[in-house]
Amino acid sequence: MEDLHLTTWEEATLEYSSSFKEYIANHPLQEQVAGLSEQELANNFNGFILGVDGETLEAYQNTLGEPIDREAFERGEIALIATDQPEVFSRIQHLTIFPCSREGSSLSDRSEITLSLGGFVPFDYKGVGASLAPTIVVSNTAMQKWFGDPAALQLELNVSSGYEQMVLTALQQLTEENSAISLTSRAEAMAELNRAKTAILSLGGSISLVVALIGILNFVNIMSVSVVARKRELAILESIGMERRQIRAMLIGEGLCYTVITLGLVFSFGNLIACGIFDLFQQQVDFAIFTYPVVPAAVIALAVLAVCYFTPKRMYQLLSRETIVTRLRKAE
């Protein structure tokens, strides 16, 4: 096992003041709290306290642009608020908390704890959300000091590569008889993602193949019609001294121009669209990794190049089987 992170939680009452008015005006459950009076808010300003270790906060920076003081957080001197709107707490410098006492804790019925507001984490941090009062995040050290043995909400395990399946099997055996415990495995999520990836690749590959064939046939048709429509023009050029290899080179050059334009659009705008789609996908699956399909892209580029090279060349070969006189007469 590489590391272990425990998230604990308990209920608490937060001291209400007028400084929270802007928060109440923008409350996530606005319909439920809109009709509450100031006294009702003060009497029912309850919420949750989360306990985490400082290491798990490294990925989160203070929304106001300042890093969270990890050492002060670990010592239990500051608390964080889970919100996506830190501006509504601009008037709040300190939080007065009344943790709900329970058997085994060191708290009396109305123990009062005052902490400095040290920053913010996202509203859906650890999937708790909020009650009437905002969710407060403190260190596990503080939670153990206040409650002794706080309730465990979430346990995150990171194991060494190669041991994922063995650890997953052991955890499934430990939790299979307790329906209250849910188990989420990155290994299982990756396996499910791979299955979905295979299905998407199969479906997307089939659609791409059909579209590619349609595009290739359309290009072959356009080039064929273009060469046939210019039969008289090409015959005249040949009659005044232009060699067949020069005409063939001209037609192949035109085809290669189409190749450059097509591949230029694919590798510029096409790649930007692909990156944009992946960014949207990564918001749902944050551990997904983007790998550029170098080999498929190279194969497609070579296929387009081959089609653009051989199609005009072959069409001119078929056309030039007839004599110049015959071609000029048919073109009249």
Image (tube, rainbow, N blue to C red):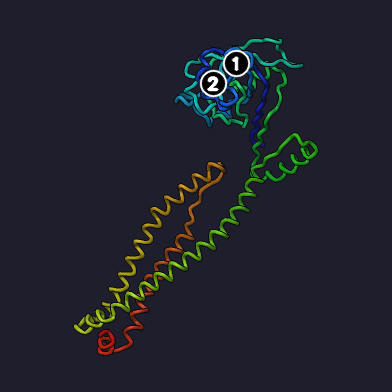
Q: Residues within 10 Å of mark 2 (few under 14, many from 20)?
A: many
The residue labelled by disc 1 is 41
Q: Give the number of the disc on residue 116.
A: none
Q: How far from the left and from the top, in percent, is residue 129?
A: 60, 29
Q: Residues within 10 Å of mark 1 (few under 14, many from 20)?
A: some
Picture quadrant where residue 148 is located: top right
Q: Is residue 222 shown above or below 187?
A: below
- Of residues 95 and 62, the one nearer the viewer is 95
Residue at 51%, 22% (x, y): give it: 25
Q: Is residue 186 shown above or below 209?
A: above
Q: Is residue 322 shown above or below 290?
A: below
Q: Mark 1 and mark 2: span between their CA atoms?
A: 9 Å
Most extreme residue toward the right is 177
Picture quadrant where residue 78 is located: top right
Residue at 50%, 26% (x, y): give it: 85
The residue labelled by disc 2 is 24
Residue at 48%, 15% (x, y): give it: 91
